[in-house]
Image (tube, coloured by chain):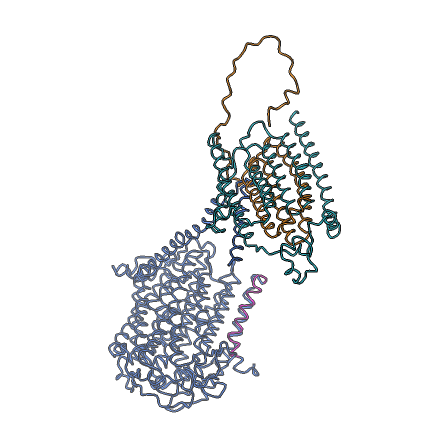
Amino acid sequence: MTMNLLADVVAPAPLVIDGLLVGALLFALGLVGILARRNLIVMFLCAELMLQGISVSLVSWSRHHGDWGGHVLVIFVLTVAACEAAIALVFVLQAFARTGRLDAAAWQSLRESNLPRTIDRELPSIDTVPPKFPKLAPAGVEPPADEDALLEREHV
Amino acid sequence: MIASILPSISPGTLLAGGVTAAAASLWLLLPRGRSAAADRASRWLGGLVGLAALAAFIATGHRLGNLGTEAVFLTVALVAVISGAATVVSRSPVYAAIWFALALAGVAGVLLVLGGQFLGVATIVVYAGAILVMFLFVLMLAQPAGLAPYDRVSNEPLLAAVAGAVLLGVLSLSIGRLTAEPPACCLMPGTKAALLAGSTAAAETPGAATAGVDMLADNHVARLGGELFGRHLLAVEAAGVLLLVALIGSIAIVSRGAADAESVARRAAR
Amino acid sequence: MNDLSPSTLLVLVPLLPLLGAILTVALGRVLGPRAHLPAIAGIAAAFVVAVTLLSGMAREVGAGGTGHDHAAKPVELVTTLWEWAGIGTAAAAGDAARSFSIPVALRLDPLTATLLVIITGVGLLVAIYSIGYMHDDPGYPRFFALVSAFVFSMSMLVAASNFLLVYVFWEAVGACSYLLIGFWFTKPEAAKAAKKAFLVNRIGDFGLAVATFLLWMTYGTLNFHDTTLADGTLVPGILGATRLADAHAYVGGAIGTAICLLFLLAACGKSAQLPLHVWLPDAMEGPTPASSLIHAATMVTAGIYLVARTAPLFEACPGALTLVSIVGATTALVAALIGTVQNDLKRVLAYSTISQLGYMFAALGTGTLLGFTAAIFHLVTHAFFKALLFMGAGSVMHAMGGVIDMRRFGGLRRVMPITAATFLVGALALAGVAPFAGFFSKDEILASLHARGWPDAHGEHHEAAPAGGHAAVAGTFHLVSVTPDAAQLAGGTRGSALDALNTPSTWRLLFWMSLATAALTAFYTFRAVFMTFTGPTRVPEEAGHHAHESPPSMTVPLVILAALSAVSGWWLFSTHALASFLAATPSFTAPAVASTATPPAFHWNLAIQGTLAAALGIVVAALGHLGRRSDGPQMERFLGPLETLFANRFFFDQIYSALIVKPLELVATLAALVDRRLIDGLVNAIAHVPVAVGSVVRHLQSGLVQRYALAGVIGTLLIVLALVARAMG
C-alpha cells in the first residue's frame, strides 16, 4: 500500500507524462538494439525491451483515462511475448544447428544473385597476451581423460 | 530542482540536445570492432554523454509535486533506462541478459508507481522468472567461448543510432505537448487525488457520474480480474489457445529439427 | 433491251466488267482453265450495251439538226447515281454555291459513246486473244480479273461527269496498269518497270490534283453538268450547257493557263509525252495483251480524252494550246527517231505509240474543231491498228518462245502467214498508206496543222482562239454567283506569256516536224516488218516446237482488227460520220470551238505530201532490210554518233537518274542512317537507363535482414515525421 500512498498523493497528469517519457526511452533503446546488434539472443532481448517500453506507455495511458484497457492489453502483450519468445528461441537453436553461429549476418542467401557475400572485415585482436608459464617436464603417468571435463567450457 | 539550475534554456532546446546526446552516446557505446583500448575509451565517453542526455531528459520532465514520490520514480526510471542501455550495448550476451533482468526490475518499479500493481508483479514473475531463464538456457547451449566476432561488431551503428534518436525526438515532442489536464479518473469526491486536483471544478464537469476507474482502490486485482473475464473473456480464451499453440508448435519444430539432424548425420555417416 | 432506259444502260457499261472482275476474283481458282468466262462475258455484254448506246446517240444527233450559227446542238444524257460526298447543303445563304458536293454522276455524250465502244470492243478482242496467249500462265485468273477491272475503270473515267471522279478513275487505271505491267512480279525488271510507270504517272496525277483544286477555287464546282440545289438555284457545271452557251464564261490569264498546263502535265504523264514518256518503253515487260490494251489503245488515250473534254477551258488560254501542240509534235519526232534504232519489236511499237500520241496532241493543240475531231479520229483508228500490231507481236513472241529481238529471227511469213498478213495490214495503216485507216486520220491531223500554219490558204475566216480579250461578265446568269468573280475575269484581259508562241511560224514548224515524223514512222514500221517477216527463215532455238501459227483464239481477233484497220478509216471519213457525230459533244459546242468549224474537205495536196513521205520511208526501209538484207548490216551505220543518241533514248533515263533518282537515294540513305544510329541509338540508350539504375539499386538487396529492417524503420520514421509535421502545422 505504500505504492498506493505514493501514487495517491501526486496529481496523475505529470506522472503520466513522465511515464510516457520512460516508455519512449525504453522503446527507442530497444529499437536501436535490434537494428544494431548481431547476436540473435541480444536481438531478442532488445525486442523484449521494446515490449517493456510499450507496457509502461500503456499503463500510463490507462492511468490517464481511468480505464482498465491498458492493463488488459499489457496482460495480453505479456502472453504473446511469452509465446513469441518460446518459438523464437526454438528457431534460434535451429539456426545455430545449421550454421554453428548465433550471427544474424550468417543468413545472406536472399541477396541478389550477382552480389558477393558480405564478409566482416578483419577485427583487431583483443585477447591479452597469455602469460608465459614455464614448461615442466612431464613426470609420472597421465591419468585417464575425464569425459565430463572435456564437455566443460571455461566460460560463457 | 534541476530546472532551476538551467532556467534560461527552453524545453525544446533541451529536448533536442538530449536527443542528440542520446544518439551520440549510443553510437559511442555500441560495439564497433575497435581495438581493446579504443573500445574502452569510447565506452567511457559514451557513458558520460549518455548521462548528460539523461540529465537533459530529466530536466524537461514535469514535477510531481511530492518529493518522496519524485525520488522513488526517478530512481526506478533511471534503473530501468540505464539497465536498458546496458542491455543493448553489452558485448557479452550473458551480461546483456543480466542487465535485462535489472531493467525488468526497474520497469516493474515504474509500473508500480504508475498504479499497475498486478502488472508490476506479473512483469517480474513472467519475464524475469520465465522468459529470461529461457534466454539463459539457450545461451548456455549456443554461445561460443569468449567473445565471438559477431558480438564485437554492429550492423550500421550510426544509422541505427540516428534512427533511434529521431524516433525518440518525435515521441518526446508529442509527449511534451500533452497538457497537464487532470484526467477523468480519480475525481470522485473523497479521493485525495480529487482534493489535489480541485474537486469543486471537477464536480461540475458533465459526465462526472461516468468518471473512470480508480486504479488505486484496494481491490485492484479483483477488479482487474473482473474486467478481464468480463469484457475481455473471448480474448482471454484466445490467449489461452495461443499459448497452447505455441507450446505444441515449439515441440513440433524441435522434434522435426531433431529428426532432420539425425537423418543428415546418418546420411553423412554412410 | 427496249424497256431499259439509256440511263440504266449507261450504268451497265462499267458495271458489267466490274461484276466480271469480282466474279473472276471469287471463282477464279474454282474455274481453273475457264477462269476467263466471267470477264469475257462481262466485257462482251458491256460492248453490246455500248454499241446500243452509240446507235441511240447517233440517232439523237442526227435528229437534232443544227442549232444557231450552224453549230451542232449539244447532246448529253446525265445519270446521277448517288451523292458521294457532301459538306454543307444549300442552307447558308450567300454561300450556297460553295457547298461541297460530289455526286457520282455519269454523262453520256458523243465523245463518251465513241470511247466506250472502243474501250469495250478492243477490250473484248484482247480478252479473247489472251485466252490463247496466257494459256499456260499460273496467274491466269488474275490476268482476266485485272483486264476486267481495267475496262471498268476506263469506262468510268470517260463516263464520269465530275472532275474528282475523273481523278479517282485516273488513279484506278494507273493502278491497273501497275498491276498488269508487274504481272510477272517475280521478274525484277518487271517489278522495276511497274514501279517506274506508277511513279512517273504520279507526277502527272499531282498535276491533275492541283488542277482540280484550282478548278474548285475558280468555278465553285467540280461537276461537268449543271446541277440544281435543293432550293432551286442552278449551279452551272464547268462543262454544262449553261456555261458552254456563254462565250465569256471561262477564265483565262494566269489562273486559266495554270489549270491548262496542269492538265497538260497530267496528260503527259498518262499518255507518255515528253518529258514523262520514260515509263512506256519499260512497260513492255508486261504481258503483250496488256500492252496491247492499255499501252496502245485505251489507257494512254486518257490524256487525249482529258484535253479534248476540257477544250473550252483550253480555248481560253491560247498559249497553253500552242504548248500542247509543241509538246505533241516534239514528242512525235523524238520518239520516231528513237524508234528507228530499236531492235526489240515491242519497243519499236512502244515508241510508235508515243509518237502517234504526240500526233494526237499536236492536233488537239490547234484548238479548231477540225483538230479536235482529227485527234479523236486518229485515236479510234490508232486503237485498231496499234492493238493489232501489238497482238501480232505477241503472236510472234509466243511462237518464238519468248524471243522478241528482231535480229534473232526472220522470214516468219512462211511460218505464220496469218500473223504476217495482218501485221502487214496494220503496218500499212500505221504508215499512213491509202486507203487504210491511218491515212485518213493522219491526213486530218496534217490538215489541221496546215490550217493554223497557213490560215489564208484555207480561205476560211478563222476566228482566232480568243487571245485573252474577255470583257467583264454580263449578268447572264440569274443564279447564285458561282461565276468567276469580275476580278478573275478582269485578270484575264492580260494574256499569259505563252501567247507569244501562238504565231503562224510556230505552226508551220510543227507541220514540217509532223511530216518528217510521218516519213520516219513509215521507215521504222516497215523496217520491223521486213526484219521480222521477210528474208530467209530463221528461228531461234528457244522456239522449240512452238514455231507455228497461233491458235484461232489469237488469230481471229487479229483478223477482225485487220479488217477494221483496213476499212474503218475510209468509211468514217467518207460518210463524215465521226466528224458530225463528235460535233454534238457539249465540249465542242462551246462557241470558241464551234466557231472554228470548217466544211469537211479532202485536202489533196496534203494527201500527196503525206503519201510521198510514207513512200520515202518504205523505200529506205526496203533498201536496208528487205529480203536477204533482213539480218544484214543495217541503216544505223549511216547515222554515226546520232545512232548512240537514239539508241540511248536521248539519254532521258540517264538524266533523270542523275538529277532525281540519285539525290533521292542519297536522302533516303541519310534518313536511314539517322533512323538507325540516332533514333535507334536514342531508344537503346533509354533502354540502358533502367539497367544502370537497377545495377545500382541492386546493392540494397544484400540478404542481411537487419539492413532490411533498418530500411523499413527509416521509411516508417519518415512517414511519422511527415504526419507530425502536418499535425503541427
Residue C597, can we see it? no
Query: Residue B99, image x and y in percent?
Result: 59, 35
Q: Colour of chain A?
A: orange
- Could you tell whether C165 is left or right of C268 in the image? right
Image height of C714 relative to C299, above or below = above
- Could you tell whether B22 is left or right of A79 in the image? left
- Could you tell whether C46 is left or right of C258 in the image? right
Q: Quadrant of residue C252?
A: bottom left
Instruction: Work out whether residue C131 or residue C187 is closer to the camera in this orientation and state it.
Output: C187
The chain painted blue is C
Residue B186, can we see it? yes
Q: Which residues are magenta?
A: C9-30
Q: Residue furthest top?
A: A140
Query: Residue A50, image x and y in percent?
Result: 60, 43
The chain painted cyan is B
Query: Residue B44, image x and y in percent?
Result: 49, 35
Instruction: Work out whether residue C134 or residue B262 is closer to the camera in this orientation and state it.
Output: B262
Say which residue appears at 63% left-offset and 20% top-offset. Answer: A150
